[in-house]
Amino acid sequence: MEQSIDQILPGLGFSSLIDFLLGFLLASIRLSAFFIAAPFFSASFIMIRVRVMMAFIVSIIVFSIQPQAIDTTSLTSAYGIFVIFKEIAIGATAGLILSIMFSAVSLAGEKIATSAGLSYAAQIDPISGVQTPIVSQILYLFLIMIFLTLDGHLTALRILIESYNLVPIGTLPLPSALIDGGMAASGSMFLNASIIMLPVVIIILLINVSIGIITRAAPQLNLFSFGFPMTMLGAFIILYLSISNFGYSFTDLVKSSLDHLMSTIERLSNG
């Protein structure tokens, strides 16, 4: 004899089960968008199944501590669709803020590689999936290692979980706060990239000036057989000697990125 859903799960009818699943789905939208856009979590070397599992586990935590803010029956209305898009916007913006600010390292690596004549040495980046210079890949992997060492991924998840208390699911913050957060992150990206690359680029420029003076004094020296090897060798030595300074710069970059993410979420709550 067939049993009804009430007999299989006492106290949980079919309508209650639908409301439960819709509430869980609504709580997982912001986290899923964050995992798609955030650095390290969106890396191509992390399987989609792993990302789905991480989003599912964190969504269970959020759904257990976050009260249901809106009626799930209104999800098919215009208000419900707007709430869904708002959740996607918050999660994607939070991930993109970290990705944009972390791109400062890739931008600095590209400029260093161009100045040192290493821009032709490029491979497929395992994180972004596009072809970038080797110098950018090494610096970005170094940044990701520092990000994980400082528990930045856990801090980012904590900030996103706290965003459910600051910006509940039912609230509708102003979109200008999201736009301002993204624009500020873009400005910080160029500033941080300049701070990281300027010391190395200036030294490489001085090396090129010295090589130009030498080749001017001794025209028999071929620029291609003498200048380029000296420039690349000097770039390798400078990068080796700058590892400790890069570590301090990347640590400050990770902390400032997380602080900027938190301030953007707070501005959303004020809006």
Image (tube, rainbow, N blue to C red):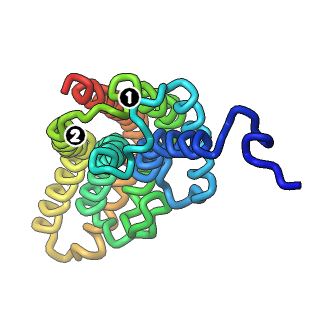
- Residue 171 place in picture, x, y as percent: 29, 31
Q: Is residue 119 above or below residue 3?
A: below
Amino acid carrying mark 2 in the image: Leu
- Residue 181 place in picture, x, y as percent: 21, 37
Viewer-closest of 140 and 199: 140
- Residue 202 place in picture, x, y as percent: 19, 47
Dot 1 or dot 2: first in sequence order is 1
Residue at the spot of label 1: 163
Image disc number at residue 178: 2
Q: Quadrant of residue 267?
A: top left
Whether residue 253 sits left or right of residue 188 in the image: it is: right
Question: How many other residues sit within 10 Å of disc 2, few (<14), some (14-19) or many (≥20)?
Answer: many
Considering the numbered disc 1 on the image, is that residue within a helix, a strand or a loop?
A: helix
Residue drawn at (34%, 61%) of the image: 232
Residue drawn at (50%, 40%) of the image: 23
| Distance between the alpha carbons at the discs numbered 1 and 2 | 13 Å
The number of numbered discs placed on residues in the rendered structure image is 2
